[in-house]
């Protein structure tokens, strides 16, 4: 309706998607600064007139989003019905500079969310932060801004994963994928099912708590004038709350 009436909409302004994209931006800036400090301000190289050192750049190679919610995180049936919809939605990822759509709830990883949350299993799930940061985050932070390099916005590898507790819920979500996508996409049907399950959902929330956790890993390296890469490092940002 907004598109039909030419009304601009600002979306993805919650915790995630939303704050998580800001975490990625902060991580990219922090990593670029760290890499520049370590590799681009080489006093000896500068004194010797080493142009390759002077024109070294920091390049963001990958951004990995990971999310964990115990139970529904006190969001109730809403997050359950939303997850059902996402289970029918191809996962947008970026790999080797190109968009790559993948099957939801696959490619499991074990992620450390830090103190109080610990290691959790997470699976691929679609997240609007992925294309936002892949396409619009300035992914190659230049040491010199006037060298005319037309590869200044290299697209990094970006993906997003989600997991919940209790662990069995993750496998139940995975099992839901056997349902027809037309049913999973049926917003009214999925909301009705979530509301029907609300007593169980609330009970589980009492048992496992309502912790929400986010982790964003930004990995990058320095790129010399001749194209060689070195100094690969990762900046990790974590946030957790009940």
Image (cartoon, helix red, strand yellow):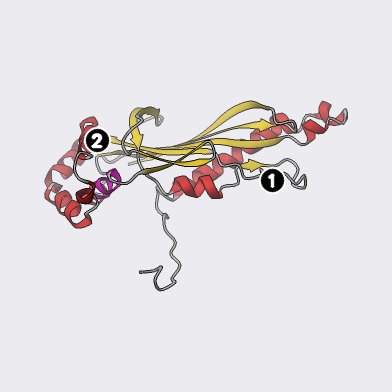
Q: Residues within 10 Å of mark 1 (few under 14, many from 20)?
A: few
Closer mark to the observer between disc 1 and disc 2: 1
Q: Secondary structure at mark 1?
A: loop
Q: Residue furthest right?
A: 48
**Residue shown at 76%/43% (left/top)?**
144
User: Where residue 160 sits in the image (x, y, percent)?
Assistant: 41, 39
Q: Name the residue tied to disc 1.
A: 150
Give, as a single range, the part of the protein colored magenta.
81-87
Residue closest to the eye, 85 or 46 = 85
Q: Magenta region's main secondary structure?
A: helix
User: Where residue 212 sits in the image (x, y, percent)?
Assistant: 34, 41
User: Where residue 176 sits in the image (x, y, percent)?
Assistant: 20, 39
Q: Examine the rendered structure and indicate whether residue 195 appears above or below residue 167.
A: below
In whole angstroms, how far apart are the C-alphas of marks 1 and 2?
42 Å
**Residue shown at 45%/47% (left/top)?**
129
Q: Is residue 159 left or right of residue 162?
A: right
User: Where residue 227 sits in the image (x, y, percent)?
Assistant: 70, 31
Quadrant of the rendered structure where residue 204 is?
top left
Q: Examine the rendered structure and indicate whether residue 49 appears above or below residue 129.
A: above
Q: Residue furthest bottom?
A: 5
Q: Residues within 10 Å of mark 2 (few under 14, many from 20)?
A: some
> Do tag 1 and tag 2 residues touch (Cβ < 8 Å)?
no
Task: Please tell me which of labels 1 and 2 falls first in the chain.
Answer: 1
Q: Quadrant of the N terminus?
A: bottom left
**Residue shown at 69%/27% (left/top)?**
228
**Residue shown at 15%/54% (left/top)?**
192
Q: Quadrant of the C terminus?
A: top left
Q: Name the residue tied to disc 2.
A: 174
Number of numbered tags placed on the structure image:
2
């Amino acid at each position: 309706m907004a598109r039909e009436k030419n009304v601009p909409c600002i979306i993805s302004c919650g915790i995630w998607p939303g704050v998580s994209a800001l975490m990625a931006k902060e991580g990219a800036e922090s990593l670029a600064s760290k890499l520049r400090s370590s590799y681009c301000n080489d006093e000896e190289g500068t004194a010797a007139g080493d142009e390759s050192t002077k024109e070294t750049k920091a390049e963001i190679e990958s951004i990995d989003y990971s999310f964990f919610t115990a139970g529904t995180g006190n969001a109730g049936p809403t997050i359950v019905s939303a997850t059902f919809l996402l289970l029918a939605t191809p996962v947008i990822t970026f790999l080797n500079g190109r968009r790559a759509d993948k099957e939801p709830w696959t490619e499991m990883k074990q992620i450390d969310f830090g103190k109080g949350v610990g290691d959790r299993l997470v699976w691929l799930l679609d997240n609007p932060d992925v294309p936002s940061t892949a396409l619009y985050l300035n992914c190659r932070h230049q040491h010199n801004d006037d060298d005319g390099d037309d590869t200044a916005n290299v697209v990094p590898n970006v993906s997003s994963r989600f997991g919940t507790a209790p662990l069995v819920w993750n496998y139940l979500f995975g099992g839901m994928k056997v349902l027809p996508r037309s049913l999973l996409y049926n917003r009214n049907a999925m909301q009705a099912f979530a509301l029907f399950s609300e007593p169980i959902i609330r009970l589980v929330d009492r048992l496992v708590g309502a912790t929400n956790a986010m982790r964003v890993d930004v990995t990058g390296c320095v790129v010399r004038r001749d194209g060689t890469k070195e100094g690969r490092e990762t900046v990790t940002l974590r946030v957790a709350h009940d």
